Amino acid sequence: MQVESKDTPPENKGLLEKGAIIFLFLWYFFSFCTLILNKYILSEMDLNAQFLGAWQILCTTVFGFIQLRLPCGQTGIGRVPGRKSAPPNFLFNMTIGGVLRFGTTILALLALKNVAASFVETIKSTAPMFTVLITWMMLREKTGFWVSLSLIPIMGGLALCSSSELSFNTIGFMAAISTNIVECFQNVFSKKLLSNDKHKYSPLELQFYMSSAALILLVPAWFFVDLPLKQLYIGRGRRRHLDRHILMALLFDGVSFHLQSVTAYALMQRISPVTHSVANTAKRALLIWLSVLVFGNTITVLSGLGSMVVLAGVVLYQRA
């Protein structure tokens, strides 16, 4: 596959590189685990979406700190070799990254709370288009005509995959639109920090520092809004408190979310923002099928057709 720009860093070898394939598989796997756990916790346990978002960011911050202190965190995706001090504009970059990560996490859970997962994925099918535009705005990388053309079947295929289960809710719709745009900005901004030859971050550092900044933003909201309620459950008239079953579900969700985040950043370091967005769209098509199987929903002809269109679009993108 040709790169989207002559300025694309040499480390972007595409999805055919061995390391990229490994991280892509791990990212897909942990994303599926997180999606199922999120939907179960929000729908079946009726957990407050804001609390779940705060819990996820707390977990990934704590786990990231531990990983950075372990021997394995001193090399590879953990540290940048030879760097002795923080990169320039560290606080500013992490504040921006924290705001984007905070918004992405909370808005995604709010959307999942109010509408079907398939509806959220339909809205997010436009992510490659937004990523192309934002990549040009922030990185000045231009996407070739044939690459841009190959994005059409990818986006359209995902919309077909999820069109059979559309359910509309104003809050859910606005949250899905917002998280789509914010996530695209976050991905391109993260790629910019990961690709800076002079002052770049490692995937684990970026994940930890951005999560820490997001956690700082979450604490006041949780303290002044959720804590006075003295409960974690709001909805359908139920008011329950933590028990062993809920704690186990939250623990698995936190671990899965952390591993999903780390593998996403590690993959992003190896590919371009547009390629990452294409991989993300293909992942969503796969997750729709897997979630249909897990939750027992009916598989339609449109779902099958959409999956084939997405696959064809990915093949065209790789050849463009």
Image (spheres, rainbow, N blue to C red):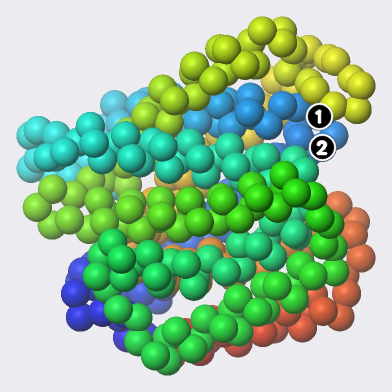
Task: Give how far across and how far down residue 317 sits, in percent.
Answer: 47, 84
Where on the picture, by quarter, is residue 110?
top right
Screen quadrant of the N terminus: bottom left
Task: Give how far across and how far down residue 156 sits, in percent.
Answer: 65, 79
- Residue at horizontal 81 percent and vertical 29 percent from the top: 46
The 10 Å Cα crowd at callout 1, few under 14, some 14 to 19, many 20 or more, is many
Viewer-closest of 223 and 310: 223
Task: Give how far across and how far down residue 173 sits, in percent.
Answer: 70, 53
The amino acid marked with disc number 1 is Asp
The amino acid marked with disc number 2 is Ser
Residue with the mark numbered 1: 46
Residue 18 visible in rendering? no
Screen quadrant of the C terminus: bottom left
Viewer-closest of 185 and 303: 185
Q: Mark 1 near mark 2, Cβ–Cβ under 8 Å?
A: yes
Q: Is 70 situated left or right of 267 in this image? A: left
Residue with the mark numbered 2: 43
